[in-house]
C-alpha cells in the first residue's frame, strides 16, 4: 500500500475552495524548533506577518512565547484578542495611524504595546497625542545596523536620541530594535562573523547609554538567519 505523504489530505473534494489548510502538527514542530534554537521561549519575539492567525499565536503562547512583533494595527489587535500581553508594532507611526494606535492601547489596557521611533519629530507627535489621551506610549528606537532600509545609524546620534526621548513625559523608551535582514550568507560561520562584527557597534552604544546613567536598554534584534 502506497504511503500517504504528510501534505496529502483525505476527501479533498469536500473542501471549499479557495481555502487555507493548516497542518497543526507541523506548526507545533516548527514552534518547538524555534524555541530549541534560542534555548528559551522567553527570548523569542516572533513576527506574526508570516501567518496573521490568532490560532497560531495561541499555540505559541501555550508553548511559552510571551512577546510578539507585528506590521499593522490589524495584526496588533489580532494579537491582543489572541491573548498576547507584549506586542511590538514594528514600524514608526505617522498620520492617522498614530491615533488608531493610541485607541488600540486604550482598548486593551492589560496589554503592553510598543512602537518604533527613529527621530525626535515623530516621537514628539506621538508624545503629544499620548498626552492628550492621558497614556504613556512605550517605544523602541529603530536602529539601522547595515540594512539601510529604516532606522537611525549606529553612531552617537543614536545615543543622543535615546537621551532626548527622556524629556518627553508621555514617551517611555524601552530599548533598541535592530533587524539585520541583510545578513543572510548561507555559510553559517561567515554569517556569524558578520553579525558579531556589526553588533560590536551596537554594544558600544548600549554601553554609552548605561554610562550616561540609564538602565540597560532591552534589545529586540535579529532576523531568521541571525
Image: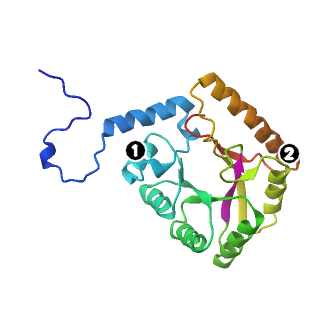
- Give the distance between the C-alpha atoms of the residues marked 2 and 1, in whole angstroms: 39 Å
Image spot of residue 103 (x, y percent) = 55, 72
Q: Is residue 170 visible?
A: no
**Considering the image in quadrants, where does the C terminus appear?**
top right
Q: What residue sits right under mark 1 in the picture?
A: 59
Could you tell whether 163 is left or right of 24 in the image? right
Q: Earlier in the sequence, mark 2 or mark 1?
A: 1
| Membership of 139 in magenta stretch | yes
Image spot of residue 49 (x, y percent) = 47, 51
The disc label shown at residue 38, or none: none
Q: How crowded is mark 2: few (under 14 residues within 10 Å), some or many (20 or more)?
A: some
Q: What residue sits right under mark 2 in the picture?
A: 208
Looking at the image, which is closer to me, 189 or 64?
Answer: 189
Tell me what residue is drawn at x 71 percent, y 49 percent: 143
Tell me what residue is drawn at x 44 percent, y 33 percent: 32
Judging from the image, the colouring scheme is rainbow
Q: Is mark 2 on a helix, strand or loop?
A: helix
Image position of 56 with respect to 123: above or below: above
Image position of 65 with respect to 119: above or below: above
Q: Which residue, as the protein is rendered here, is positioned at the far bottom?
A: 132
Find residue 134 and report its image quarter.
bottom right
Could you tell whether 18 is left or right of 118 in the image? left
Looking at the image, which is closer to me, 156 or 184?
Answer: 184
Image spot of residue 3 (x, y percent) = 18, 23
Image position of 146 with respect to 167: above or below: above
Read off the magenta span: 137-144
Q: Which residue, as the protein is rendered here, is positioned at the far top?
A: 1
**Considering the image in quadrants, where does the N terminus appear?**
top left
| Membership of 167 in magenta stretch | no
Give the number of the mark in front: 2 or 1. Answer: 2
Tell me what residue is drawn at x 74 percent, y 53 percent: 152
Amino acid at each position: 500500500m502506497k504511503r500517504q505523504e504528510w501534505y496529502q489530505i483525505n476527501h479533498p473534494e469536500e473542501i471549499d475552495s479557495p481555502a487555507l489548510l493548516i497542518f497543526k502538527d507541523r506548526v507545533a514542530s516548527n514552534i518547538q524548533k524555534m524555541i530549541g534554537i534560542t534555548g528559551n521561549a522567553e527570548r523569542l519575539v516572533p513576527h506574526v506577518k508570516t501567518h496573521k492567525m490568532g490560532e497560531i499565536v495561541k499555540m505559541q503562547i501555550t508553548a511559552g512565547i510571551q512577546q510578539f512583533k507585528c506590521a499593522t494595527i490589524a495584526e496588533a489587535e489580532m494579537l491582543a484578542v489572541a491573548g498576547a500581553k507584549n506586542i511590538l508594532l514594528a514600524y514608526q507611526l505617522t498620520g492617522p495611524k498614530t491615533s488608531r494606535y493610541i485607541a488600540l492601547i486604550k482598548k486593551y489596557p492589560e496589554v503592553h504595546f510598543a512602537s518604533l521611533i527613529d527621530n525626535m519629530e515623530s516621537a514628539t507627535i506621538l508624545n503629544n497625542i499620548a498626552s492628550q489621551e492621558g497614556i504613556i506610549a512605550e517605544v523602541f528606537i529603530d536602529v539601522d545596523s547595515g540594512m539601510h532600509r529604516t532606522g537611525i545609524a549606529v553612531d552617537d546620534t543614536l545615543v543622543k536620541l535615546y537621551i532626548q526621548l527622556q524629556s518627553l513625559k508621555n514617551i517611555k523608551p524601552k530599548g533598541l530594535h535592530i533587524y539585520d535582514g541583510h545578513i543572510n550568507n548561507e555559510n553559517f560561520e561567515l554569517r556569524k562573523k558578520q553579525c558579531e562584527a556589526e553588533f560590536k557597534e551596537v554594544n558600544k552604544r548600549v554601553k554609552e547609554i548605561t554610562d550616561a546613567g540609564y538602565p540597560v536598554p532591552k534589545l529586540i534584534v535579529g532576523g531568521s538567519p541571525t
